[in-house]
Image (tube, rainbow, N blue to C red):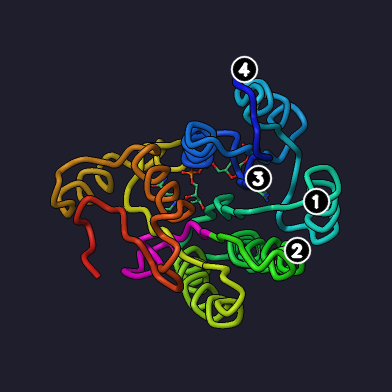
Amino acid sequence: MSEQQQPRSIALVTGASRGIGAAIAAELIAQGWYVVGTATSDVGATAIGERCGDGGEGLALDIADSEQVSALIADVLGRHGKIDALINNAGITRDQLLMRMHEKDWQAVVDTNLGGVYRTCRAVMRSMLKARSGRIVNIASVIGLTGNAGQSNYAAAKAGMIGFSKSLALEVGSRSITVNVVAPGLIETDMTRDLPEASRTAMLSRIALGRMGAAADIAKAVGFLVSPAASYITGETLHVNGGMYMA
Ligand SMILES: NC(=O)c1ccc[n+]([C@@H]2O[C@H](COP(=O)([O-])OP(=O)(O)OC[C@H]3O[C@@H](n4cnc5c(N)ncnc54)[C@H](OP(=O)(O)O)[C@@H]3O)[C@@H](O)[C@H]2O)c1
C-alpha cells in the first residue's frame, strides 16, 4: 500500500502458523518488517502468506531436517538478498516422566527445539557476518530455568538454547550481530490448551500477576529485541512470565 523507499528489513520467523510465532509475525509486520514465516505443512504456509498480505510470505519447513533448513535459507537469501533477523520460535513438547520417556521422544524434542536453533543459526551466519549486522532471538521457556516434572527433554533443550545463545553472542558480537533469548512463562496457545486443570491451577497460583500471558506479550519482547533500541543487548535472556520466575 505505502511506497517503500528503502528495502524492508527481512525477518525469518519459524513456527509462524499459530500461537506465539503468529503473534511475532504480526508484531514485526506492524513494525515494518517483511516476514518470512514458516509452518510444517504447505497448507500452513499458504495460510501464513494470506495472513501476512504484502507484509510477508509463508514457507514450509521442518527445522529437524538439515537439508530443508539449508534450502529454505538459501532460497530466502537468493530472493531477498539478506535476512536481518532470525526468530527461532518453532518448538514441540513430548512430555513424560523420565522413567517412561522413550528415546524417540527425547530425540524429537532435543533435535527440534535445540538442534533446529543450531541449524537455522548456522545457515544464516555467513550472510549476517558479511552484512556485519543481524539479530537472532531464540524462544526458550521458563521451564529451561526452573525445570518441570515430566519435561526433562523440553527443559534440557530450552536450557541448552540459553547456553548456545550466550556462546554465539560471544562469537559474533564483533560483527554487530546480537543473539538473545526470550523465555516465556505460561502463555495461552495450543501448546498449553490441553494442560490438565490441576496443573493449570497450580501454575497460575505461582504467577505473581495471577494470569496466563498472551502470545502478544512475547511478540512485544521480540519486537523490542530486534529494534534499534536493543542494539547494545546481547547474550541476554528476557523473562516474560508475569512473575512466575524471577531470575
Ligand atoms: N505456550 C507456552 O506457554 C510457551 C511457554 C514457554 C515457551 N514456549 C515456546 O514458544 C514457542 C512457540 O510455542 P507455542 O505455544 O506458540 O506453540 P504451538 O502453538 O504449539 O506452535 C508451534 C509452532 O511450531 C511449529 N513447529 C512444530 N514443529 C516444527 C518443526 N519440526 N519444524 C518447524 N516448525 C515446527 C508449528 O508448526 P505447525 O503449525 O505446522 O505444526 C507451530 O507453528 C515454542 O518454542 C515453545 O516451546 C511456549
Instruction: Determine whether the residue tagged by mark 2 lies in a helix, strand or loop.
Output: helix
Q: Amino acid at mark 4?
A: Met
Q: Is residue 57 visible?
A: yes
Task: Tell me if label 2 and label 1 are in contact, CB under 8 Å.
Answer: yes
Instruction: Tell me residue 200's x, y (percent).
Output: 27, 44
Q: Which residues are magenta?
A: 137-151
Q: Amino acid at mark 2?
A: Ser
Single out the mark in the foreground, 3 or 4.
4
What crowding class fits label 3: few (fewer than 14 Cα within 10 Å), some (14-19), or many (20 or more)?
A: many
Q: How many marks?
A: 4
Instruction: Tell me residue 158's x, y (percent).
Output: 48, 66
Q: Amino acid at mark 3?
A: Ile
Q: Amino acid at mark 1?
A: Leu
What crowding class fits label 2: few (fewer than 14 Cα within 10 Å), some (14-19), or many (20 or more)?
A: some
Q: Is residue 197 left or right of residue 221?
A: left
- Tell me which numbered mark, 2 or 1, is placed earlier along the sequence: 1
Mark 2, residue position: 127
Q: Quadrant of the C terminus?
A: bottom left
- Tell me which numbered mark, 4 or 1, is placed earlier along the sequence: 4
Indicate yes or no whether the magenta region holds residue 149: yes
Mark 4, residue position: 1
Mark 3, residue position: 10
Single out the mark in the foreground, 2 or 4.
4
